[in-house]
Image (cartoon, rainbow, N blue to C red):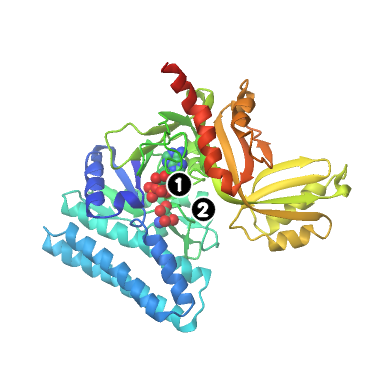
Amino acid sequence: MIVMKFGGTSVANFEAITRTIFIIGGKLDQKPVVVVSALSKVTDLLYRISDAAASSDSDLTSQLMQELRTRHVNLASDLLEQSPALKESAVARVNAICDKLESLVNAVCAVGELSDRNKAIIISNGELLSSTIICFAMNAKGIRTNFIDARKMMVTNDEYLKGDPIVEEIEKRVPPIVAEAYKGMDAVITQGFIASNMSGEQTVLGRGGSDYSASLIGMSIDAERIEIWTDVDGVRTADPRTVQNTKYLEKISFEEAAEMAHFGAKVLHPLTIEPAVKKNIPIYVLNSMNPSGKGTAILRNELIEDGVKSVSFKENIKVINIFSMKMINTSGFLRRVFEIFSESKVSVDLISTSEANISVTVDASEKVDAVVAQLSEFAEVIVDEDKSQVSVIGKNIVRLNGMLKKTFAPLKRTNVYMISQGASFVNISFVVDREELTEVVRDLHYHLFEVEEELEQF
Ligand code: ADP
Ligand code: ASP
Ligand code: MG
């Protein structure tokens, strides 16, 4: 069996879904478990619907609900034009999902208050709608496809909006559900991103979580491979939206991919790698708009060469600087500091320490007021905002001769605030002013990946 996950752009509209079904149709002999995201931009739309309802803006809420319904009804009708009976059932199903959502949204709008629990229910409708429509469309194309409700098998803790998967439970539930659904079928389809807690209440895995769903399912069924179909030709040396001359990477290690994703490369959800590593399942990142391309293989460490692979970045972070003379030689100081971060559930990215100072970076979206207040009880705390974090990633780069020089040489005129070398030798990260980010990333990419190629051409 294989897992094939299709992201928002791969299921954005009639053309994209037609292409996607064609790709799936070519792999039926490998028994695909298809995992889909919401149509492109639909999860954003659902967030806007939640916000509008929470602020009791009923005009905006119903206007956005209409937009959601029309887009999906039209898509179902277009895809099933040739199969009137299926078209009727699909449109009825889409309308039923939208009706149910609309009554919840209207209730939220009436009270003007939105719990995380209800928000999770609202934002999971994107995946429910897309998977329903694509399931009908696959059947219409002659691929006998069964629908699996991911909420029956993907189980998380009670964090409604960023559920932490309960791996043992998922591993127990997925195989029999998939096996049962596969009986007499050519394929099965389910939703990424959505899950439920142990009491059956709905949760989601957090933004971009469909990759993580695919990987958890792959792990549970011992898949031969996990394919992540997206809108780029595999993993590249940097985000092609920021850097022009990025290069394609034929293969990278699990560890490199995990670090790239963790340090900002949006191409994979940061936790995607973990379940695959557990069972040593290769992940392929492929382009649904160019299906004959080879994509990038993400494989175990031993199969990958040393060397720099990519420049990743996080555009908006905060640096929290903690100063305390008392820190010198007091055991337990660091523990106390990190306990405070952990109790407030603020996740820390980079850390650097000196005798009397610790600096840590956190994502700009983290709420740090409570942490700062507690730290200020025993230390001086300064928070720097509008900073960006840049990471150079590659197997053993920290040990490679001249890598530090190569990394910092292009930054002569840039203020660098904090430098951190990963203990696993895979990354060198540093912090710069947000306004300088684009230039820094482009310069660095040029020096690491483009200049030698230019010289070779002489
Ligand atoms: P999907 O909807 O398929 O999950 P995403 O938008 O989440 O797609 O991820 C794909 C995007 O990731 C690409 O369009 C690209 O802009 C971005 N990206 C960031 N870093 C990289 C990288 N190093 N290599 C390839 N793509 C990257
Ligand atoms: N639809 C969800 C999101 O936009 C999950 C995903 O696409 O991976 O965040
Ligand atoms: Mg994604």
Crowding around mark 1 (Cα neighbors within 10 Å: few <14, some 14 to 19, many 20+) is many
Picture coordinates of residue 257 (x, y %)?
Answer: 50, 36
- State the residue lying farthest toward the bottom: 110
Residue at 44% x, 76% y: name it: 53
> In the rendered view of the protein, which quadrant contains the C terminus?
top left
Residue on which the image places disc 1: 216
Q: Is mark 1 within 8 Å of ligand 2?
A: no
Among the 4 quarters of the image, the one containing residue 243: top left
The answer to which of marks 1 and 2 sits earlier in the sequence is 2
Residue at 61% x, 22% y: name it: 400
Q: Is residue 139 above or below residue 95?
A: above
Residue 127 placement, left or right of 335: left
Camera-nearest residue between 265 and 92: 265
Residue 193 visible in the displayed image: no
Picture coordinates of residue 51 (x, y %)?
Answer: 47, 71
Residue 223 placement, left or right of 390: left
Picture coordinates of residue 237 (x, y %)?
Answer: 46, 33
Q: Is residue 427 above or below residue 456?
A: below
Residue at 61% x, 58% y: name it: 366
Residue 277 placement, left or right of 375: left
Crowding around mark 2 (Cα neighbors within 10 Å: few <14, some 14 to 19, many 20+) is many
Picture coordinates of residue 287 (x, y %)?
Answer: 33, 40
Among the 4 quarters of the image, the one containing residue 42: bottom left
Asked if the residue at tag 2 contacts the one at tag 1, i.e. Cβ–Cβ closer than 8 Å, the answer is: yes
Residue 266 visible in the displayed image: yes
Query: CA gap, disc 1 to disc 2?
Result: 9 Å
Residue on which the image places disc 2: 165
- The kind of residue on which mark 1 rests is Leu
Q: Is residue 353 above or below residue 82?
A: above
> In the rendered view of the protein, which quadrant contains the N terminus?
top left
